[in-house]
Image: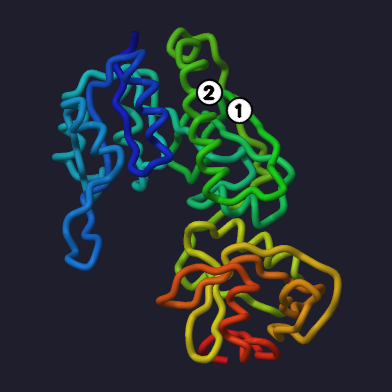
């Protein structure tokens, strides 16, 4: 049983934290500061903080880990190793040097593919046949440390960012628990990443969700799955935002963004092929199947979709 300081923030980190609590001594938890949320902008605690409070664990919520006071708190907590999972802050070398067995990170990709903040979305959008998790020894770079272990899985044809997130969170916890004893016992040799194979997955922004109808239907369909649930994939119709929640690629052609009739419901022209939306949601309204959406809005047929500034 080891002394572990855990650093994480969102739902992705929970399986790893729960697994550590069941098998090791978690001597402290570091998570992001509470954030205002909702109409009243009330303070919203992270999922990791909720678990820390439930177990009455020492808690640190720094805005930066470069400040001396945060480093002093960390240095006072007993720790053989730090475990990091979707934390949200960069760990400076002064923090990485604190635990004798270093800092391990659970990363949601098969490194060196998809370093960065949004590896799950990037892998779906790129049409990768498989994804996975990596357990790596952290250094001061961006997901550039040597890898201790990896576990892969095959992508489902209808994989979304949400479904892959859930699968990888569980897989990451399993990978950590299986390999942590060997790492602590000096029986694992870190393997450097092949820098020639690096790809990057930068942070997503809300505006990344706008659909570019000049792109091939296959790319747009992947975007829709990759951006479910956030930032979503949307277009504009009649001055309002329209979300495309589910879609499939079908044969045919039409001008990019043009809504055309299909035997069952409707299709939308793209740069290559037609996209058949299965579920849509107009701003301020509930989600609907495309046939129901069209039934209540016949003017949608033959419309041209785009961005508000187009």
Q: Secondary structure at mark 2?
A: helix
In the image, taking residue 18 as reference, residue 261 lies left or right, namely right
Q: Residue at x 41, y 42 (%)?
A: 86
Contact (Cβ within 8 Å) of mark 1 with mark 2: yes
Image location of residue 31, percent across then percent down? 27, 41
Between 39 and 2, the residue placed more toward the observer is 39
Question: Of label 1 and label 2, which has the lower sequence position?
Answer: 1
Image location of residue 104, percent across then percent down? 43, 28
Task: Indicate which disc residue 175 carries.
Answer: 2
Q: How many marks?
A: 2
| Relative to 68, residue 185 above or below | above
Q: Residue at x 25, y 45 (%)?
A: 66
Q: Which residue is mark 1?
A: 150
Between 9 and 65, the residue placed more toward the observer is 9
Q: Quadrant of residue 2?
A: top left
Image location of residue 56, percent across then percent down? 16, 26
Q: Residue at x 18, y 39 (%)?
A: 70
In the image, taking residue 57 as reference, residue 230 lies left or right, namely right
Q: Quadrant of residue 77?
A: top left
* Quarter of the image where the N terminus is located: top left
| Relative to 205, residue 148 above or below | above
* Quarter of the image where the C terminus is located: bottom right
- The crowd level at tag 1 (other Cα within 10 Å; few <14, some 14-19, many 20+) is many
| Distance between mark 1 and mark 2 Cα atoms | 7 Å
């Amino acid at each position: 049983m080891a002394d572990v300081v855990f650093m994480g923030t969102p739902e992705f980190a929970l399986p790893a934290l729960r697994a550590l609590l069941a098998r090791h001594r978690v001597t402290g938890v570091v998570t992001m500061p509470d954030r205002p949320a909702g109409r009243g902008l009330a303070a919203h605690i992270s999922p990791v903080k909720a678990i820390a409070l439930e177990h009455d664990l020492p808690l640190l919520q720094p805005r930066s880990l470069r400040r001396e006071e945060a480093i002093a708190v960390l240095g006072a907590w007993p720790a053989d190793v730090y475990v990091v999972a979707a934390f949200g802050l960069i760990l400076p070398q002064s923090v990485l040097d604190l635990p004798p067995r270093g800092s391990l990170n659970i990363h949601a990709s098969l490194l060196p593919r998809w370093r960065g903040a949004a590896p799950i979305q990037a892998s779906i959008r790129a049409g990768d046949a498989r994804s996975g998790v990596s357990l790596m020894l952290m250094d001061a770079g961006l997901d550039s440390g040597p890898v201790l272990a990896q576990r892969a899985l095959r992508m489902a044809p209808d994989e979304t960012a949400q479904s892959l997130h859930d699968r990888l969170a569980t897989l990451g916890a399993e990978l950590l628990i299986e390999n942590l004893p060997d790492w602590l016992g000096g029986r694992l040799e870190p393997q450097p990443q092949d820098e020639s194979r690096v790809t990057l997955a930068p942070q997503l922004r809300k505006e990344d969700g706008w659909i570019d109808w000049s792109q091939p239907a296959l790319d747009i369909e992947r975007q829709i799955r990759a951006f479910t649930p956030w930032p979503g994939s949307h277009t504009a119709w009649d001055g309002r935002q329209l979300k495309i929640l589910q879609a499939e690629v079908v044969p045919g052609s039409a001008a990019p963004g043009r809504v055309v009739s299909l035997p069952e419901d409707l299709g939308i022209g793209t740069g290559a092929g037609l996209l058949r939306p299965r579920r849509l949601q107009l701003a301020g309204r509930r989600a609907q199947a495309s046939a129901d959406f069209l039934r209540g809005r016949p003017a949608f047929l033959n419309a041209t979709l785009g961005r508000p500034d187009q």
